Image (cartoon, grey):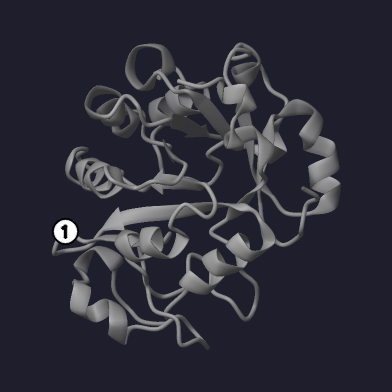
């Protein structure tokens, strides 16, 4: 494996859910096309729907982005073309569509959204990426999801997501373990870490000097200037960092 400190993961700023704005929905094909045009890497979120299709969408619920009641996990592939993002003609894309659009033009950082039993989503992503020619990595808050990648596709770069977990509906013990990344050593064994930018620097990441640290999600030039001295790269939105 190449020196990760000399790879795209630390050299190209990563657009959070693509380059989106009030006219371009997050995690849409237009947002990804815009990121490609401007030369940024792309962060995106994946989850499974009812028929086993891997879709690119962040929320569990459809309400914020689509304006419909209901949950993403109950959709099927036929629903995707019908449902549109608010004030847009854009539909919820599948990971397959995104891979075909990006086609190696810029690197992808794929967040695995899985709080349930691991295996099906992870294997579906592995299968879709098997013949993909571009650069990519995966990341997840779930260390057991990363463990699946470690065991079944160790060649794929994997990153442990973490942060303060303020406001999250998690037990004290889960917050304690995840915030401290206590399962890194024996479970996820990440190649890099993505940590909440507003909490940096902190003692939890300082011990990982041998792997890259990404900061998420940086939302202004002021935040960027403050955090860049503590990390190797940023995941950003709402402003344009210099490349």
List x then y, in percent, for residue 166: 56, 42
Depicted 83 relative to depicted 226: above or below: below
Depicted 74 relative to depicted 52: above or below: below
- Mark 1 residue element: loop
Q: Quadrant of residue 147?
A: top left
List x then y, in percent, for residue 222: 86, 48
**Residue lying farthest to the left in this orientation:** 51
* Residue sitting nearer the eye, 200 or 166: 200
List x then y, in percent, for residue 152: 22, 28
Q: Quadrant of residue 207?
A: top right
**Residue 203 in the figure: left or right of residue 241:** left
* Residue sitting nearer the eye, 164 or 214: 214
* Residue sitting nearer the eye, 211 or 67: 211
Residue at point 40%, 18% (across, down): 189
Q: Quadrant of the N terminus?
A: top left
Residue at point 59%, 61% (across, down): 36
Which residue does the numbered mark 1 point to in the structure image?
A: 52
**Residue 19 in the figure: left or right of residue 48:** right
List x then y, in percent, for residue 44: 47, 54
* Residue sitting nearer the eye, 232 or 105: 105
| Image label count | 1
Q: Quadrant of residue 78?
A: bottom left
Q: Can residue 19 be seen in this snapshot?
A: no
Question: Label 1 neighbourhood size at 10 Å, few (<14), some (14-19), many (20+)?
Answer: some
């Amino acid at each position: 494996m190449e020196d990760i400190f000399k790879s795209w993961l630390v050299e190209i700023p990563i657009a959070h859910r693509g380059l989106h704005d009030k006219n371009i929905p997050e995690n849409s094909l237009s947002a990804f096309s815009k990121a490609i045009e401007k030369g940024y890497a792309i962060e995106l979120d994946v989850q499974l729907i009812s028929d086993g299709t891997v879709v690119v969408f962040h929320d569990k619920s459809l309400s914020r982005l689509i304006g419909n009641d209901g949950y993403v996990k109950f959709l099927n592939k036929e629903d995707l073309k019908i449902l549109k993002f608010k004030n847009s003609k854009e539909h919820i894309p599948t990971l397959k569509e995104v891979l075909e659009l990006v086609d190696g033009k810029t690197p992808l950082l794929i967040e695995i959204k899985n709080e349930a039993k691991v295996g099906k989503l992870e294997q579906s992503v592995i299968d879709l990426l098997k013949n993909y020619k571009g650069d990519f990595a995966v990341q997840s808050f779930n260390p057991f999801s990363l463990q699946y990648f470690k065991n079944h596709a160790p060649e794929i770069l994997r990153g442990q997501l973490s942060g303060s977990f303020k406001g999250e509906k998690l037990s004290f013990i889960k917050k304690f373990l995840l915030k401290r990344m206590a399962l890194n050593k024996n479970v996820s064994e990440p190649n890099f870490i993505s940590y909440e930018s507003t909490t940096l620097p902190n003692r939890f990441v300082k011990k990982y000097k041998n792997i890259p640290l990404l900061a998420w999600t940086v939302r202004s030039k002021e935040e960027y200037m403050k955090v860049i001295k503590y990390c190797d790269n940023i995941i950003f939105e709402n402003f344009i960092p210099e490349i």
